[in-house]
Amino acid sequence: MKKGKGTHSDRILIIIPFWEGDKPQAIMMAKLLADLEPRHSDRADLLFVRRFDCKPLPEQAIKYISRKFNIFQHRSARKETGWPAGCNGIFAGALEYVYHMSEAGRIPRYKAYLNMASDVVPLVPDWIEYLHQQWKFLPANLRHPVTSAGALIPGEHEHINGDIFLFSGDLDYLNWIKQAVGSVRVRAGWDWVLADKFREQGWANIPGVISLWGTKTMDLQTAQELRRKGTVMLHGVKDDSLLNHARKMML
């Protein structure tokens, strides 16, 4: 196991990738995360990763969110654009940052990372603690090491959705996933392309994490019903409807 120079942290680092097209939604989502925290979080930090051609977040937004979270910002050097290359590239850029900064001791060595796209919405206030508990007990429940977890999508090509992807902070694993995602060249998402590899490394479904990829909008009644059934985090609603519903339900 690679040791690195950084101090170990029991926190999760939440990676929020964005480009100009979804930057407003990313800001709206991050402000919701801040408003859900009763005090400055000692359970998670935030890393905003913008595409190479995207302007930084407004200072006013950073000031607002930093009331509740420690914040890092990074501009990805990867030049891919469009779908899926742009999504693959920005995640590869995020992985390059967290690996090299962790190895150099310039950021803490987090116990886990969460890739959290702008269309991911928590539906309960203590969603961060829920992830901590899931990460702690999944290996014990499954009786084998777990290096990634999230919304496991069933079907002919089973995979964990990459927009809501919890993964290990072990430096050896970070080095592997950095290289694996960075080498994807086919016209498909990294989560789909590398599914067999993630399975081999050890993956798990998190029952309260749901992906409804490509959902255009959602009404309040549906959101309330999903929450009642135990949904903790929901991915895939493309407009701002679920973010607004989440505020009404929790704040």
Image: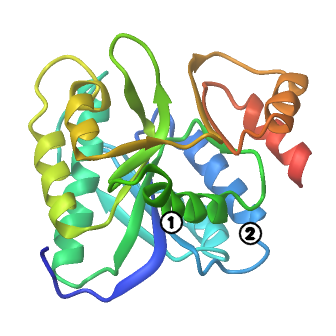
Element at badge 2? loop
The amino acid at mark 2 is Glu
Crowding near the residue tagged with mark 1, few <14, some 14–19, many ≥20 C-alpha atoms within 10 Å: few
Crowding near the residue tagged with mark 2, few <14, some 14–19, many ≥20 C-alpha atoms within 10 Å: some
The residue nearer to you, when weighing 111 against 240, is 111
Query: At 69% from the left edge and 64% from the top edge, which residue is drawn?
Result: 34
Q: Is residue 77 above or below residue 192?
A: below
Q: x and y percent of residue 199 in the render?
A: 28, 37
Q: Is residue 196 above or below residue 32?
A: above
The residue nearer to you, when weighing 68 against 21, is 68
Element at badge 1? helix
- The disc at residue 37 is 2
Residue highlighted by disc 1: 136
Which residue, as the protein is rendered here, is positioned at the far front?
Answer: 143
Query: At 61% from the left edge and 40% from the top edge, which residue is drawn?
Result: 207
Q: x and y percent of residue 95 in the render?
A: 24, 55
Q: Is residue 47 above or below residue 68?
A: above
Query: At 64% from the left edge and 48% from the top edge, which residue is drawn?
Result: 29
Whichever of labels 2 and 1 marks the residue nearer the N terminus, that label is 2
The amino acid at mark 1 is Lys
Q: x and y percent of residue 191 in the render?
A: 31, 32
* Quadrant where the image shows the N terminus: bottom left
Which residue, as the protein is rendered here, is positioned at the far top?
Answer: 156
